[in-house]
Amino acid sequence: MRHECYDCHIRTVSTLIDKFQPDLSTAEGFEREIRELLDRNPDAETPYLATLLHRRAKEVMKVENLYEEEKHQATDLLLSRYGYWKEMVESREDPFGTAAMLAVTGNIIDYGAHSTPEDIDAVIHELLGHSLARDDTEELKRSVGNARSILYLGDNAGEVVFDRLFIETMGHPGVIYVVRGAPVINDVTMEDADRAGMHRACRVIDNGYDAPSTLLPYCSEEVKDAFHEADLVISKGQGNFEGLMHEKRPNLFFLLMAKCDPMANLLGVQKGDLVITKSNL
């Protein structure tokens, strides 16, 4: 395990303790458990360890949806401005590219990566002025045009609103949007997708698992089959990238912000860069 990943898990523990304020004994016991978990599993994938950490956090804090309020606030904020964002996309010379860029900038909303800004709206406007560090948008656009079926793997609540706008801008009838099977961090679930109106844009299914990633061996048979059978897979977010970066299949695109140095290095970009890239594996 990279030391950065270990430190990130421990920061998550501290964040959860600060958020829910358990008594001192409970807090110390929770942190001790997680440190022991990490020490026992030095070779485990980071998203899998995050799954175990948050399952235990739900038990310790006695809360099933640890970031429910934050998820609702982020989704409602972006949804309240949906007309504005849609009009902006439609007015641009390249609506597809603009909607794709919005979908990527929305990836800033992530409590697991400790990257969520206080003023989400302002930061999104700022990021729209940036260039993509890796930009395969045109190839993605061609792949959408040639695909009969598209599997779109969602990441976080809040940004699901921009996922919806991107899917509507594609105008493709064969899109399936995939959410998590149960609450974990602020990742998008069926409830969050419904709140964002995603069902108006495409079919929505859950993956049957509660990792903050897409870990195919643990997903439902429906999602496994869809992943392998789809003509095109669009994977949103760093968590999904971590789970799928070694998958060998054609037409797999990653849309994300690089939120830590290890993942940025793997992508050949800088921390904080925005990326739309086709998997070359």
Image (cartoon, grey):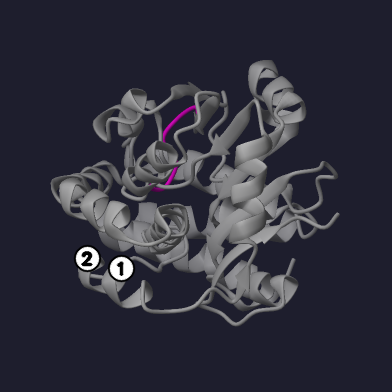
Closer-to-camera residue (256/110): 256
Identify the image quadrant of residue 134. Answer: bottom right
Q: Is residue 23 visible?
A: no
Farthest top residue in view: 222
Closer-to-camera residue (25/154): 154
The residue at 27%/71% (across/down) is 125
Tag of residue 124: 1
Residue 233 position, x and y percent, is 66, 39
Q: Which residue is mark 2?
A: 121
Q: Is residue 210 above or below residue 116?
A: above
Relative horizontal placement of residue 116, taking residue 12 as reference (left or right): left
Farthest front residue in view: 93
Closer-to-camera residue (167/123): 167
Amino acid at pointer 2? Asp
Labelled pair 2, 1 in contact (Cβ < 8 Å): yes
Q: What span is colored magenta in the figure?
A: 181-186
Residue 120 position, x and y percent, is 25, 65
Tag of residue 15: none
